[in-house]
Amino acid sequence: MSPFQPHTALGRRLRRLLGWLWHQEGSHGQRARGLAAGLFCGCYPFFGLQMLLSVALASVVRGNHLLAAAGTWVSNPFTSLPLYWFNYQLGCWLIGPGAGWPGLDDLQAGRIWHSGGGLVSRLLLGSTVVGVACAVLGGWLYWHWLEREHRRGKRQG
């Protein structure tokens, strides 16, 4: 039995947390812009700064701050390495081949930023492209979902 199933205490708590996040204050546009800001910032490898940057960006675009912070969860311990590897590969495709992706030891020791401008520029370019795509798609889908739920609530109520 998984601890995340709806009938377990952890599953119920997780379900309440997700419900609370999805039903934040603000217009549909503010909520979608906040989530989009978080998704955009979450695609960058700025560990420890992603939430701060997402809240700052949400302030600029007048989005929901809490949803911006939650949107950064797109990169987490399970997704960060594949996400940043993909971002780097996309950067290589756009700029041209680089020196190569650093080894696991370099990543774990945090030496990725000392790998040279070629790696960093490709990673940041790929992160920007992926971040924009995630932000636009995620914000748009969330806005449409909110609109659909609002119309459904009007028909039922």
Image (cartoon, helix red, strand yellow):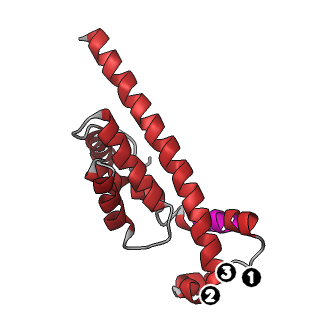
* Label 1 SS: loop
Q: Are marks 3 and 2 in contact (CB under 8 Å)?
A: yes
Residue under label 2, please give it.
115
The amino acid type of the residue labelled 3 equals: Gly
Region rendered in magenta: 83-89
The amino acid type of the residue labelled 2 equals: Ser
Q: Nearer the viewer, residue 137 or 157?
A: 137
Does the magenta stretch mainly form a helix, a strand or a loop? Answer: helix
List x then y, in percent, for residue 12. 29, 42
Residue positioned 42% across, 36% down in the render: 142
- Check the image and report above or below for 67 versus 72: above
Number of marks drawn: 3
Residue positioned 62% across, 87% down in the render: 115
- Check the image and report above or below for 85 versus 22: below
Residue 80 located left or right of residue 9: right
Quadrant in which residue 125 is drawn: bottom right
Q: Nearer the viewer, residue 46 or 153?
A: 46
* Label 2 SS: loop
Residue positioned 54% across, 84% down in the render: 113
- Check the image and report above or below for 150 versus 97: above
Residue under label 1, please give it.
99
Q: Are marks 2 and 1 in contact (CB under 8 Å)?
A: yes
